[in-house]
């Protein structure tokens, strides 16, 4: 709650009141100046506050008094909370004085420069345990009417080891337990909170959890892409932390956090090892995940992985002999060509250089030359399958048969 103030806001009781009475009638027409106490001249439409005003009732001689909180004004009738700041509720006679005056209790609502710079209301040293923090902030809010829109700076005394929650107290009153998340409601991980390093949290608009602004992993990603000398640091992901950075040092170095390049076979691979001993291998064999490795000068490499890698990145293969083939690594399409010697008539069978693993889609054959009677000869393809092609010859002597086939 915040305090409202006015200039020379005074009046008198219009009638006697009892010690328990919470509505007070004052002199006719003076309710207007009291109502202004509950309408601050400066306000933020996006931030709602409960507003009260301090009013004091005293006798004519001002020898006794009672401090009250003004909560509502209706015409010339005031609604109040009696007996505040250690004063006693008592009965008062008509014509007793009533007015708005600053009291000792008002002091807690005034914020001074040192309060702001010292963080009196938004800074705290966390109590509790490593993952269950207790935060107690001074406040004038009540339990049923509270909010926190300003960032809170918390100085931890322990590193966290996992998920974190904050038990929040305002002025000693328990508000509740709130989980702490980072980014898009991601749980905190080990060492996101570091002892002695203040972190910042902001209460979500639903008032059900805190967002941590400066999780430890953010510090670790703010590093140079290249260190002095020839060594190169390569962040493994956009959310990488320091222990998952890879440092290229040698061909067989498997120290935690380092990268090694091996080529035990035709297809070499990259192997990464994290601080916890877990490894990640790229391109070891035809069953491992593959991606594009793009060289970017001396700054290192960018590795790209599609959502569904499939056969992406498998090398094309070929046999460049007279009877050879070409195989597409990405699609598996195979194109084959071969030349065979043949003579005589009838059905002839010729094997493809390699069998098609799944299907021969198309196959054609031709002859280089003809003999015997040039006015009469016959040649055509009779059949095909994944392994060979069958042709029929008539009127053809010794010649070359050329075959071209496509499949997968």
Image (tube, helix red, strand yellow):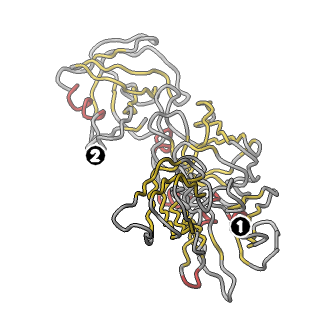
Q: Secondary structure at mark 2?
A: loop
Which residue lies at the image location 63% right of the left edge and 64% below the top edge?
Answer: 236
- Write the residue at 63% across / 41% down: 136
Q: Residue furthest bottom?
A: 229
The reply, left or right, for residue 232 in relation to residue 372 is right
Front residue of 29/127: it is 127
Along the line of sight, which residue is nearer the eye, 265 or 196?
A: 265
Looking at the image, the residue that sits furthest to the left is: 29
Could you say which is closer to the camera, residue 45 or residue 165?
Answer: 165
Return the x and y of residue 268 as percentages of the image width and height: 71, 69
- Give the mark, 1 or 2, whose residue is nearer the N terminus: 2
Query: Looking at the image, which residue is at 79% across and 70% down?
Result: 264
Residue 141 percent across, percent down from the top left:
49, 34
Q: Determine which of the numbered discs, if any, sits on residue 269 in the image.
A: 1
Residue 408 seen anywhere in this rendered image of the structure? no
Q: Is residue 265 left or right of residue 329?
A: right
Please determine whether, in this image, residue 378 is positioned above or below residue 207: below
Q: Is 100 rendered above or below residue 291?
A: above
Q: CA distance from mark 1 to mark 2?
A: 66 Å
In the figure, residue 94 lies in which quadrant?
top left
Q: Quadrant of the N terminus?
A: top left
Question: Mark on residue 49?
Answer: none
Query: In this figure, which residue is indicated by the disc labeled 2?
Result: 42
In this orientation, does residue 237 appear? Answer: yes
Count of marks, rendered view: 2
Q: Position of residue 290 (x, y in %)?
A: 61, 60
**Crowd band around label 1 with a 10 angstrom C-alpha radius: few (<14), some (14–19), many (20+):** some
The local secondary structure at tag 1 comes to strand
Density class for disc 2 (Cα within 10 Å; few <14, some 14-19, many ≥20) is few
| Residues at circles 1 and 2 in contact by the CB criterion of under 8 Å | no
Residue 259 picture quarter: bottom right
Residue 312: x, y in percent? 54, 58
């Amino acid at each position: 709650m915040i305090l409202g103030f006015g200039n020379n806001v005074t009046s008198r009781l219009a009638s006697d009141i009892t010690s328990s009475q919470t509505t007070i009638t004052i002199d006719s027409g003076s309710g207007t100046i009291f109502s202004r106490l509950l309408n601050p001249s400066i306000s933020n439409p996006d931030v709602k506050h409960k507003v009260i005003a301090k009013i004091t009732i005293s006798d004519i001689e001002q020898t006794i008094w009672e401090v009250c909180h003004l909560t509502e004004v209706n015409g010339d009738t005031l609604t109040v909370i009696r007996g505040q700041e250690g004063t006693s509720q008592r009965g008062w006679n008509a014509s007793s004085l009533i007015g708005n005056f600053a009291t000792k209790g008002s002091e807690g609502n005034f914020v001074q420069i040192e309060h702001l710079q010292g963080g009196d209301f938004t800074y705290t040293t966390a109590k509790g345990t490593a993952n269950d923090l207790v935060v107690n902030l001074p406040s004038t809010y009540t339990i049923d009417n509270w909010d926190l829109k300003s960032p809170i700076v918390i100085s931890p005394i322990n590193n966290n080891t996992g998920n974190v929650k904050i038990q929040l107290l305002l002025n000693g009153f328990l508000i509740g337990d709130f989980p702490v998340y980072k980014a898009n409601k991601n749980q905190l991980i080990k060492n996101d909170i570091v002892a002695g390093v203040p972190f910042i949290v902001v209460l979500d608009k639903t008032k059900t959890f805190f967002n941590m602004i400066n999780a430890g992993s953010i510090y670790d990603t703010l590093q140079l892409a290249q260190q002095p000398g020839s060594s190169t640091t390569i962040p493994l992901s956009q959310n990488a932390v320091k222990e998952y950075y890879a440092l290229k040092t040698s061909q067989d170095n498997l120290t935690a956090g380092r990268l090694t390049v091996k080529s035990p076979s035709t297809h070499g691979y990259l192997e990464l090892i994290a601080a916890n001993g877990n490894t990640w291998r790229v391109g070891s064999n035809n069953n491992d995940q593959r991606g594009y490795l793009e060289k970017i000068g001396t700054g290192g490499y960018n590795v790209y992985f599609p959502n569904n890698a499939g056969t992406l990145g498998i090398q094309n293969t070929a046999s460049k002999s007279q009877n050879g083939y070409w195989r597409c690594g990405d699609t598996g399409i195979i194109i084959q060509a071969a030349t065979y010697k043949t003579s005589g008539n009838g059905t002839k069978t010729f094997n493809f250089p390699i069998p098609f693993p799944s299907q021969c889609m198309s196959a054609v054959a031709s002859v280089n030359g003809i003999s015997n009677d040039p006015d009469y000869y016959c040649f055509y393809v009779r059949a095909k399958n994944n392994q060979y092609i069958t042709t029929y010859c008539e009127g053809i002597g010794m010649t070359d048969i050329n075959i071209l086939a496509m499949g997968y």
